Amino acid sequence: GEDGSLLKKKSKKKKKGKDANAIHKSSEESDGPILDCESKVINNSLNTNQMDPVCKAVDLLKISHATPKSIDEAKKKHYQFWDTQPVPKFDEKIEEHGPIDVEKTIDEIRKEPYSLPAGFVWDNVDINNPVVLKEVYTLLNENYVEDDDNMFRFDYSPDFLHWALQPPGWKPEWHIGVRVQKSSKLIGFISAIPAHIRVYHHKQLMVEINFLCVHKKLRAKRVAPVLIREVTRRVNCFGIFQAVYTAGVVLPKPVSSCRFLLLLFIIAYFSALRFCSGADLMYYLRPQF
């Protein structure tokens, strides 16, 4: 969890992009001097005294290419970031099932939004507005999850995003954006959707945190931690204090995992894009009996 009791993370294999057609080739497009100025604005607007524990914790989260992919590897690793979070350790024996932190009442929840760096403003993202939905699509298309070599990125269509972000019980307050105050450019996004998760014999209303994305040129500028804190606050205001999310790596402590396979229809095409390796091709080209 990034902030208090809300973001108690479940780690499991990424469920995004089950179709190879949802992979988008990365580009090197530049956003010009505007974002360079925005980076300076953030640097000048924050100092050490303003860094809260969430920001400091996120600074410790530096996942490298050597991030463990299995439980055995993970048990040998020291998790500098996750050791600061309310999540079980790999070797911890769970004696009792329930909330890790004491839940608060709605009256105890902060009513005002958290402060953003100077030059940036909050935005309630209206995905039913086609123009705004296209902005969210563009942000994710150009800045969201990539492979380790930064060559491929998930390409979720506007129609898919519109469907995925509005399941039964969705709240418009949980689609949160950050914009540049002067240009109104969308540079950050995070979402939460309701989910009823069964834990043994207990069914718990939680939220699933998804599509956390900050523009590439503004990474590590304190925007992501504030997005996490704000979605936490807004979800807490509805009396929900637990959340889950998925990851493609092993983090303390996974409670479930899943696996998906990609079926390549045009092998030569994906090979030319370097989407698959020689070993992958040998698997597809071997005789099938």
Image (cartoon, rainbow, N blue to C red):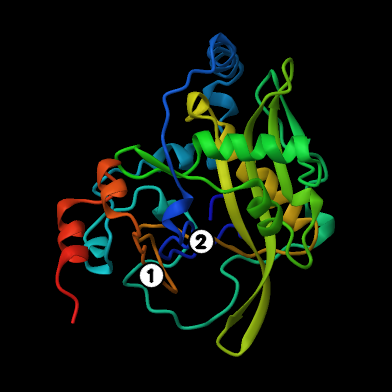
Q: Look at the image and tell me whether residue 244 can be seen.
A: yes
On the image, the x and y values in percent for residue 139 come to: 59, 35
Mark 1 residue type: Arg
Q: Residue at x 72, y 41 (%)?
A: 133
Q: Residue at x 40, y 67 (%)?
A: 253
Query: What secondary structure is found at the residue carrying circle 1?
Result: loop
Left/right of residue 119 with respect to residue 84 in the rendered view: right
Q: Nearer the viewer, residue 33 or 24?
A: 24
Q: Residues within 10 Å of mark 1 (few under 14, many from 20)?
A: few
Q: Write down the residue under mark 2.
A: 9
**Sooner in the amino-acid sequence: mark 2 or mark 1:** 2
Q: Specify the label residue 259 is tagged with.
A: 1
On the image, the x and y values in percent for residue 84 come to: 44, 52
Mark 2 residue type: Lys
Cα separation between marks 2 and 1: 18 Å
Vertical position of residue 32 compared to residue 164: above or below: above
Location of residue 261 (image quadrant) = bottom left
On the image, the x and y values in percent for residue 215 come to: 54, 30
Left/right of residue 244 with respect to residue 80 in the rendered view: right
Query: What secondary structure is found at the residue carrying circle 2?
Result: loop
Q: Specify the label residue 56 is tagged with.
A: none
Q: Nearer the viewer, mark 2 or mark 1?
A: 1
Location of residue 134 (image quadrant) = top right
| Labelled pair 2, 1 in contact (Cβ < 8 Å) | no
Q: Look at the image and tell me whether residue 52 can be seen.
A: no
In this rendering, the count of numbered labels is: 2
